[in-house]
Amino acid sequence: MSDIAIQLANISKQYHIGRLREGYKTLREALNEAFLSPFRRAGKLLRGQATGASELDETIWALRDVSFEMKHGELVGLIGRNGTGKSTLLKILSRITQPTTGFAEIWGRVGSLLEVGTGFHDELTGRENIYLNGAILGMKRAEIARKFDEIVDFAEIGKFIDTPVKHYSSGMYLRLAFAVAAHLEPDILLVDEVLAVGDASFQKKCLNKMQDVGEQGRTVLFVSHNMPAITRLCRRTILLDAGQIVQDGPSHQVVSAYLNSGLGTAAAREWPTLSTAPGDDVVRLRAARARMEDGQIADAVDIRKPIVLEMDYEVLKPDYLLMPYFVVINEEGVEVFTTIDADPTWRRRPRPAGRYVSTAWIPGNYLAEGTFFVGVAMRTLDPMIRRFHVRDAIAFYVTDSMEGDSARVDHAGNLGGVVRPLLQWTTHVIPNGHPDPAPAVNESGR
Amino acid sequence: MRVRLPNGSTPTPTRPLSLRAGNMPVTHIQPSTGWVSLQLRDLWEYRELLYFLTWRDIKVRYKQTVLGAAWAIIQPFFTMIVFSLFFGQLAKIPSDGVPYPIFSYAALVPWTFFANGLTQSANSLIGSAKLIRKVYFPRLAIPIATVISGVVDFALAFSILIGMMLFYGIVPTANIVWLPLFLLLALITALGVGLWLSAMNVQFRDVRYTIPFLTQFWLFATPIAYPSSLLSEPWRVLYGVNPMVGVVEGFRWALLGTDTAPGPTIIVSALVALVLLVSGAFYFRRMEKTFADVV
């Protein structure tokens, strides 16, 4: 393969825990260790205890045999819990630290953005910091000079450009810092959690800029905890856990696998043993699933596509009036809606014993992006009794990519709300600036 | 038939030219062991960063101080006054035929440059810990920029030296053209020691506490308060093992016309300074891989 941008082969990184904790040691400690540890080892040997380097010098593997490839122009997300080696991996690729074993090759100019405002000096003015920070990030002076006005515009700091940055508000400081970084034009960009700082409008700006970078055909490796951002920006995502690659594939799949593993909820769940299944002697739940139109289990669903909720249950005693329903809750715990089976086929009809599947269709362009948890429940009418209600029985993840035909339209930043319907909009020009007394809404042939 | 690109390389047919296949830099990342090359070419690539780091050090040094750049003068000037009183007036130490104040000040100017450069470069990596943990660039740039930025302070202190020469009516000899070389020698020595100490300082913070002691000791081991002519000839050459001997006596010779023309002493001094610099650079590069993890 010739269009490879980054190639990693069995990269591992070992840290000494003592060093991690203390950072550095004093000469006395080093001498102590050097002189005493042989005696300690000898002592242990005499007492018949095992000796090993691991005992004297505890280490951990921050990364273990990480191998993958990225092609030019690819945007790849890197996710995982805290402390799973994401940042270490970026540090190795940006040559800040060396791997313990393994090797990597990178084709192209690398720019890394592990923090915004690295090297900013409080005493220097905005203008001076733009040059200093630009040089630290690897820009040439001429390049900075050429982009200077653009950077100042982007940062929206205007007349404060010649004020020392220590007098800036934190918002201005961040905007300026990101503005410099955003104008870095490497072939390969390594970004760590830059979007986790700043207010909503700043985050939106960052995200839009990241979008641009991707569209310019640059290669981006992007670490984030912001799952909607990851699925929106990157087609491919790598999931790290305990320093190893757990999954590497299409973003929506990897993200939902990650979310599901973390939350213990999957898009499909079964209760194989009837006696322990939720419910009572009238009806018991056997399975619950979230599917896509084509029948696939829907860990992650495109916002434009419908979602099919299914409950599979066994009626044990005949002649009851059953009322299946789903309760859909978003990741903030807000109940989005409760939907009750309205199918006339079985509504108010006593059911014979047997196995049933009830299905509810959530239309496309309805739920907002994010994780949704589904409670699966059943009531009987007369007597009005709840037979089962399994909260958070299943979960699925709605993704909103930036393809322009969802309710997100051309907006890359955060969109609030629990639902995201694609509503009909019209805009018309007012002739001569006078409002038309009767706007032509329903005149076209209805 | 293969096409030659303007830069002389042949394009890989499978990679589109839009990716600048011909001149795309390749970075190899792998663990290094033991002694590694200095990678001066890499440092050269980052020369603009070196410039900006130097410029930052100069800009920031006296911000928020009341006296500002006057500190660059105060330090050697007041030391000169103290030396003149105690060593010149009371101890009556000989001064090679020139007035004692200018005799000691001509030595204190390069000495202050050296001592500050050494101290600041030794602490420079720790001071830039945040940078080292977050960005890659050749780490050598940090101590180098620190030492170079001291040249501004040197220039300020030197202007007072010119004033004093006018005051004492001393006309510099034509040998003044050699002065930049002596300054360079001081710079190389400060950097050489600074590289050793800064790299050690990352591992062992004890280094920070030994520096004031080291500079004080070195001050008296250098002919600043006294002339090296107190020593007889074979010993004077050996004295050149301290490179600052060559620097200080060179300054006096070039400016004040003392009888300390650079002979074998300066060669010894220059050799020692070069050994310090090269060994310091290699030691620094060897330790460099641990900086980001330890600092």
Image (spheres, coloured by chain):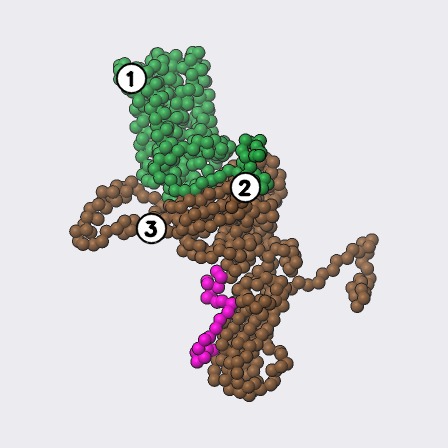
Give the side of residue B145 with respect to residue A54, left or right.
Answer: right
Determine whether the residue tagged by mark 3 lies in a helix, strand or loop.
Answer: strand
Residue position marked by numbered label 1 in the rendering:
B236
Q: Amino acid at mark 3?
A: Thr
- The vertical placement of A95 against A446, above or below, is above
Nearest the viewer among B187 and A347 is A347
| Residue sitting at x 35%, y 52% | A60
Q: Foreground residue, A153 or A370?
A: A370
Q: Which chain is green?
A: B
- Report x, y in % for residue B37: 39, 33
Name, please, the residue furthest toward the left: A46
Q: Which residue is mark 2?
A: A186
Q: Rounded to the nearest whole Å, what is the CA distance between mark 2 and mark 3? A: 35 Å
User: For residue A262: magenta?
Assistant: yes
Q: Are marks 2 and 1 in contact (CB under 8 Å)?
A: no
Q: Which stretch did the figure color magenta?
A: A257-278
Query: What is the crowding at mark 1: few (fewer than 14 residues within 10 Å), some, or many (at least 20)?
Result: some
| Residue matched to label 3 | A59
User: Sequence order check: which comes first, mark 2 or mark 3?
Assistant: 3
Q: What's the colour of chain A in the image?
A: brown
